[in-house]
Image (spheres, grey):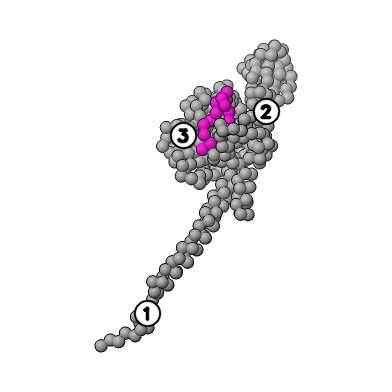
Amino acid sequence: MKYYTNKARQAGMTLIELTVVLLVLIGLAGLMIPYVSGFVSKTHDATGSDSLASLNSAIQRYDVQFLGQPSDYDSLMATDLTSGTGYTKLMGGAIEAAAGADKGYLKEVSVLGEVLTSVGIDSLMTMNNSTSDATFAATSGSVGIVKTTTYQLAALNVSTDCSGATAPMGCIASDSELSVILGRPVNTGSNDYLAFGVGQNSGMVGKTISEAPVHFAKTGAMSAANKYNRILAIYEVPNNATVTAGGFCTGAATTVAAGVLATQPATMMLCTDMNGAGVDQGALETNGTWTMVMSPKAKFVTTAMPMMMLEGLGGALASHYSSVDD
């Protein structure tokens, strides 16, 4: 016959002891949840900052290695790029028509093709507003950029009315506010700041970056499937308010004799004849003198994330270090 002692029968935890342990574990879990959530947020902000900085570097390396800017950015515009139909799946809302309310942080602007082709951007991807995947299947095809054609493209917008209930989140009220976002001085009175998405079709993929980066949103409603989560490349171009002599010429002019024109670089653009009429380099045999200026060119500025509020590298770093201090 086996004999069971009281000690053997009492091996293990009693119900009361088990309840106490569970309560302690639940309490610890409740204390840890805010820290875990904060850690995820900090990681998210740090990743966004790294992606912006890496893409900045990749675009600059491309310019040095290939002597120009990459083609086939995501245009953020649909159809043929001349009709002004914006991509509808952006986190920040619709791209405002140039003559509309203009309160969102993106608007339409008119850009001469030569502004892009002169730096190597000779094609752009059109967007697909019917897609079920707003980020990874966002484009519908490539469109070649013709230097003499005017295109409707997306640009950053500074609004004069960011107050009141009708102003959307992310409305940019001034140049100084946009300067803080981008981390450098801007002048929207003289320049437009074109915004292109860096998608997988970008000419730099496989050259200076292996994959086009994605900024994953913090909420499911803004996920890559529902909203566009690519990073933007921002380019500065002279706007239509500053161009002179023929519509798209700007800068210091030099008057030269007609016989000298054939020796000038192809990047030069003939803007006016002695009567002020706009011409191109095909009219070299005309008598008289010509005013010749360098055609305006797009200039890479920085990168930004198109979230509900536009966020550049400066803002992303500030957000990251702010969350680290918390």
Task: Rate crowding at label 1 as few (under 14), some (14 to 19) or many (20 or more) other CA atoms within 10 Å.
Answer: few
Q: Which of marks 1 and 3 is in front?
A: 1
Residue drawn at point x = 45 percent, y = 32 percent: 128
30 lies above or below 235: below
Q: Mark 2 — residue?
A: 189
Residue drawn at point x = 54 percent, y = 40 percent: 307
Residue drawn at point x = 61 percent, y = 33 percent: 163
Of 111 and 26, nearer the camera is: 26
Of 231 and 120, nearer the camera is: 231
Q: Tell me, for residue 10, which label it has, or none.
A: 1
- Quadrant location of the N terminus? bottom left
Q: Which of marks 2 and 1 is nearer the N terminus?
A: 1
* Residue 110 position in % (x across, y down): 58, 24
Main secondary structure found in the magenta portion: loop
Does the magenta run of residues contain 324? no
Q: Mark 3 — residue?
A: 139
